[in-house]
Amino acid sequence: MAAGQAIGVRVTDTLAALRPLTPFFCLYVTFGATLGFLSGGAPLILRARGVELAEVGLLQLINLPVGLTFLWAPLLDRLHLPVLPHRIGWIVAAQGVTVLLLVLLSLGAQWPLAGLLVLAVATCACVATMDIALEALVVETVPGEQRAFVASAKLCGASLGGILGVGVLVGSYDRFGWHGAVLACAALDAICLVPILFYPEGRRRGAGGR
């Protein structure tokens, strides 16, 4: 009985320690799932539908915004959106637009590849914007000694998201089709946004040091 109670206490303590990482983990799941599906899963689907290999190769341009976020990161530093705290406001805005673009993309099963590519690049730009706002939130609100845990949550979340985006969503394509698979990705992004809404950015601002 005592051993069981001790195990229960340890499990409870572990869950309590991991709870602050939940908002970061969830958002990185969406980061990995969305980029994984758009840049890894969608090309497989389009190739299976008979799209030429050279055209499918163009979809690697989807990843371009991830390497260009330095161009608009200073804008996110200067501008504060209304209602929500600074960083969370940008996270919610970027993730919200990502969901809307995915819903729109779900309607484009028969659209020309160029149209799908433009929407996918725009979606990736929103995901990348969410990522830099989230990184800034970590730097400003998480003490240095705890950032290693956040980094672990990031890697675990992004890896799990990649499995969901490339594996599960592509694997469910035969059952749900393009519309259902892309909507599932949009739903995942919307659900995983919820925990960050309760993150006390204002109270923790400055905890990350100068």
Image (tube, rainbow, N blue to C red):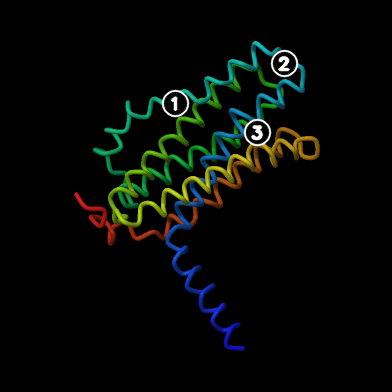
Which residue lies under the disc numbered 3?
106
Q: Tell which of 104 and 47 is nearer to you.
A: 47
Q: Which residue is mark 2?
A: 51
Whether residue 168 is situated above or below residue 69 in the rendered picture: below
Give the SS element for disc 1.
helix
Question: Horizontal and vertical percent for residue 18?
Answer: 47, 63
**Residue 85 percent coordinates (x, y):** 31, 52
Give x and y (percent) for residue 208: 26, 53
Residue at image coords 72%, 27%: 45
Q: Which tag is nearer the camera, tag 3 or tag 2?
A: 2
As measured in the structure, the alpha-carbon distance from the residue carrying label 3 to the one carrying label 2 is 18 Å
Secondary element type, mark 3: helix
Dot 2: few (<14), some (14–19), or many (≥20) neighbours within 10 Å?
Answer: some
Residue depth check, mark 1 versus mark 3: number of the one nearer the observer: 1
Residue drawn at (77%, 21%) of the image: 49
Asked if labels 3 and 1 touch by Cβ distance under 8 angstroms, the answer is no
Residue sitting farthest toward the front? 3
- Left or right relative to 126: residue 1: right
Q: Nearer the viewer, residue 62 or 81?
A: 62
Report the residue marked by disc 1: 65
**What's the residue type where badge 1 is placed?**
Pro
Label 2 near label 3: C-beta < 8 Å? no
Secondary structure under badge 2? Answer: loop
In this image, 78 relative to 113: left or right? left
